[in-house]
Image (spheres, grey):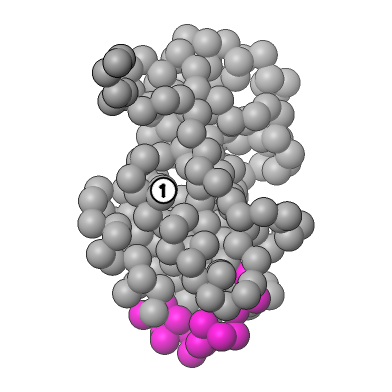
Amino acid sequence: MILSIDTCLNASSVAILDGDVVRAARSEPMTRGHQERIAVLAREVAAEAGVTFAELTRVAVTVGPGSFTGLRVGLSFAKGLATALSIPCVGVNTLEALAASAQAVGLVAGVLDAKMGQVYLQVFDGGRPLMAPDALEVGVAAARLAELYSGGPATLIGSGAPLVAEVLPGATVLTPAYADPVAIARLAAAKPIPGHSPRPLYLRAPYAVAPAA
């Protein structure tokens, strides 16, 4: 029984997966306020599923890339809940979650607009990663996509998908504001139990830096 949590992008999302059965799932669009909503949402979804937290066997959480504040909110809640229940907490990166949300065959790329002329990119084929998640200039990301594409169907998913779509003119372009929490739970179910708690996945430094002494 897996509870998935996502606050990395523009929603607070929770799902409960019981084996192959989706017991309940909900996503509430928001750009801020995740901290006030995620715990309440988790309780509401558990009640809808007819599940108590004590019945959970694993907690899944997105670890980024995404909002610096948002990802830490979800990660802190997930790790705290898993610790209290003495169950594993499994991290899922947001690009992987977006790619799985597409439910598409062939090449699938998770692409997030990282602003400042960059995108966060990870490319998959049949669910297998062809590269590690990375922060790249838009032109470099487009070139990487062209290099990895070997023909057949292609899907670009995420807020940054339109920025690189020209390099694969036949690709399906999807721009959801957040990943499917059920896809996150399914990804976590397939992962081995980690030997440590999940950590934030920061692909570049925050904009604000402390002044030099």
**Residue 180 in sight in this render:** no
Image coordinates for residue 154, horizontal then vertical, percent: 60, 31
Residue range of the region highlighted in magenta in the rendering:
44-58
Q: Which residue is mark 1?
A: 71
| Left or right: where 180 falls relative to 68 | right
Give neighbour class at mark 1: few <14, some 14-19, many 20+ (Cα, 10 Å).
Answer: many
Q: Residue at x 45, y 13 (%)?
A: 137
Q: Quadrant of residue 185?
A: bottom right
Confirm whether the magenta stretch covers residue 40: no
Left or right, 32 with respect to 2, comes to left
Q: Position of residue 44 (x, y in %)?
A: 36, 80
Q: Main secondary structure of the magenta part?
A: helix
Callout 1 amino acid? Leu
Residue at the extreme right of the image, as rendered: 192
Name the image quarter holding the N terminus. Answer: bottom right
Rendered location of residue 136, percent (x, y): 50, 17
| Residue 45 occupies quadrant | bottom left
Q: Is residue 95 above or below residue 113?
A: below
Q: Is residue 37 left or right of residue 17?
A: left
In this rendering, the answer to whether 39 lies above or below 183 is below
Residue 175 x %, y %: 39, 39
